[in-house]
Image (cartoon, helix red, strand yellow):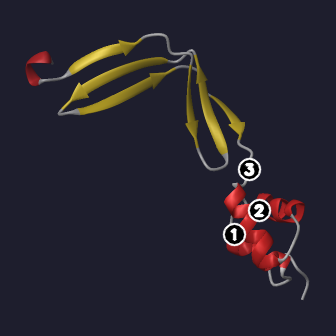
Amino acid sequence: MRQMGIKTTELEGVEEVVIRLPDREIVIPGAGVTVTEMGGQRIYQVTGQAQERRREYSPSEDDVSVVMEQANVDRETAVRALVETRGDLAEAILRLRGQGPTQAP
């Protein structure tokens, strides 16, 4: 493998590996990680027992400000709408203006 320019090493001291997805995280505590280098790129191979946990959404201050301004609501209401729509600004604003799909006609 070395003759082909491929180098493989174990990454020492790994405490955990976390893969973040929009709605959840895959956590691998005490993971074994092998790093393979070839062609100027690194490939990480992860082994271990995976656990999944739900990821809570937390809106940014910029998003909260936009919703507050556009929907003319207080901070708490803007945050609640953003959490309910998982950060979809347009949907949050439309809901607060009474034009969203969760509002009765």
Residue 62: % across, % down = 68, 61
- The residue sitting at the left extreme is 3
Residue 101 visible in the current orientation: no
Q: For mark 2, does the 10 Å Cα neighbourhood hold few (<14), some (14 to 19), or many (20 or more) residues?
A: many
| Distance between mark 2 and mark 1 Cα atoms | 7 Å
Q: Residue at x 59, y 45 (%)?
A: 21
- Give the labeled residue for mark 1: 89
Q: For mark 3, does the 10 Å Cα neighbourhood hold few (<14), some (14 to 19), or many (20 or more) residues?
A: few
Relative to residue 39, is residue 63 depicted above or below?
below
- Give the labeled residue for mark 3: 58
For residue 103, which quarter of the picture? bottom right
Relative to residue 92, is residue 61 depicted above or below?
above
* Amino acid of disc 1: Leu
For residue 11, which quarter of the picture? top left
| Label 3 SS | loop
Q: Relative to 40, is 4 on the left or the right?
A: left
Q: Residue at x 69, y 75 (%)?
A: 90
| Label 2 SS | helix
Residue 56: % across, % down = 74, 45
Q: Relative to 33, is 17 on the left or the right?
A: right
* Amino acid of disc 2: Leu
Badge 2 vs badge 1, beta-carbon distance below 8 Å: yes
Residue 9: % across, % down = 31, 14
For residue 96, which quarter of the picture? bottom right
Q: For mark 1, does the 10 Å Cα neighbourhood hold few (<14), some (14 to 19), or many (20 or more) residues?
A: some
Badge 3 vs badge 2, beta-carbon distance below 8 Å: no
Residue 14 visible in the current orientation: yes
| Label 1 SS | helix
Going from the N terminus, do you reach mark 1 or mark 3 first? Answer: 3
Q: Nearer the viewer, residue 36 or 47?
A: 36
Residue 82 got which mark? 2
Residue 49: % across, % down = 59, 21
